Amino acid sequence: MPPRQRPRDRAVVVAFGQRVRQLRRAAALTQEGLSEAAGLHATFISNVERGYRTPTLSTMLRLANGLGVTLAELVEGLEDAIADEA
C-alpha cells in the first residue's frame, strides 16, 4: 500500500482491481490479452488487479475499451466499497 493512502481510497483501488479481474475473466481474456486489447503493459494490468496501481481516467477508458464494456460498467459497484469504509 502506498504511504499516506487513506483506507477508504485503498478500498476503492482494491475494489476497482477486483472489478477489472472479474470483467477480464468474464471476457475470457488473460492479462496479456487485455494488455494487448487496451494497449497497456501486462505488468500494469496485474498491478491494477492487485490494487497496487491507481489508473488515471484515460487509462480506465483504455481498460473499458479493452474489456468491451462502458466506463460505467467498469466502475459499477465501486460505490459499495466507499460505503463499506465510511
Image (tube, rainbow, N blue to C red):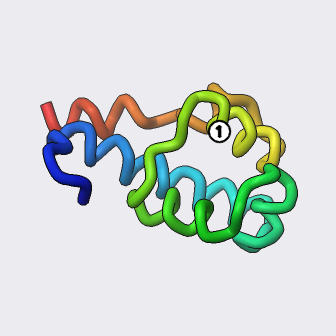
Q: Is residue 7 left or right of residue 75?
A: left
Which image quarter holds the C terminus?
Answer: top left
Q: Residue at x 39, y 60 (%)?
A: 52
Q: Residue at x 63, y 26 (%)?
A: 72
Q: Quadrant of residue 42?
A: bottom right
Mark 1 = which residue? 59
User: As rendered, which of 61 and 77 lies closer to the eye?
Assistant: 61
Residue 32 position within the rendered picture, expressed as x and y whole percent measured from the top left:
77, 72
Tag 1's secondary structure? helix
Amino acid, disc 1: Thr
Q: Report crowding for label 1: few under 14, some 14 to 19, many 20 or more residues within 10 A (C-alpha).
A: some
Residue 60 position within the rendered picture, expressed as x and y whole percent measured from the top left:
63, 37
User: How many numbered marks, from 0 up?
Assistant: 1
Residue 31 position within the rendered picture, expressed as x and y whole percent measured from the top left:
70, 70
Q: Is residue 6 left or right of residue 65?
A: left
Above or below residue 86? Residue 4 is below
Above or below residue 60? Residue 10 is below
Q: Residue at x 26, y 47 (%)?
A: 10
Q: Is residue 52 left or right of residue 56?
A: left
